[in-house]
Amino acid sequence: MKKLYAILLASALSIISFVGILPTTIATSNNLNKNSKFVLIPLPYSYDALEPYIDKQTMEIHHDKHEQAYVDNLNKALTNYPELYSKTTEQMLKNLDTLPTDIKQSVINNAGGVYNHEFFWSVMSPKHNQEPSGNLLKAINSTFGSFDNFKKLFTEAALSRFGSGWVWLVKDSNNKLSIITTANQDSPISLGYTPILALDVWEHAYYLKYQNKRIDYINNWWNVVNWNQAESYFNR
Ligand code: MN
């Protein structure tokens, strides 16, 4: 009888802990294993899934080396503040003022690096040549005039981002869309925005295949946008 009790208790506990860690969205940047260090989350598709637009080798290096470095440096930065391992990158980036001053910039850079890349992977898809639809398309049309004009403005923003950074489609608390760029690994969630779409314009995102031709990278990237996922970010 005691043994049965123990088994029942153990399965109840495992159900509770399982429900407790369920991610609510694809790009959670959740540290799923609470109270332990951050780990690199696998890409949601194979390394060659975005070929021919983004090549396999770029994806391998980008995910396995660059994002891994952000994970490692985030863990290093939190060494003296182990209570922060139980936070998500999102929680830290949305509350930068609560962080210890001596690690704040490192968290901006490295939690930002982790969050931004997880988000970026999630808004690309092996199902190529999708188009926006539904509420998001309506909002794009009413904000930017047309989908083509939105693409033109987003592309111009991506080209004009000097040095390393990102271009984003975001919404504010009134659901109003805008296109913004951020430097380095600064994240729009630290500015109070909800990201809908992101493009990494660091050279490491495209240099192997496209060298200095950022415009070719951007033009090709449109083919792999996961509009379905962007739509669900807009609707949340
Ligand atoms: Mn990157």
Image (cartoon, rainbow, N blue to C red):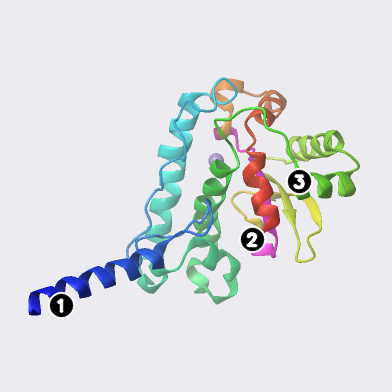
Q: Is residue 163 magenta?
A: no
Type of amino acid under label 1: Tyr
Labelled disc at residue 147: none
Element under label 2? helix
Does 183 sit above or below residue 152?
Answer: below
Query: Is residue 155 rendered to the left or right of residue 73?
Result: right
Q: Tell me if I can see residue 161 in this picture.
A: yes
- The amino acid pointed to by label 3 is Gly
Element under disc 3: helix
Closer to the N terminus: mark 2 or mark 3?
Answer: 3
Q: Quadrant of the N terminus?
A: bottom left
For disc 3, the neighbor class at 10 Å (few under 14, some 14 to 19, many from 20) is few
Q: Earlier in the sequence, mark 2 or mark 1?
A: 1
Residue highlighted by disc 3: 134
- x, y (%) of residue 110? 49, 55
Q: Is residue 60 left or right of residue 35?
A: right
Dot 1 corresponds to which residue?
5
The residue under the point 62% across, 55% down is 186
Residue, disc 2? 189
Three-letter code for the amino acid on which mark 2 is drawn: Ile
Q: Which residues are magenta?
A: 189-204
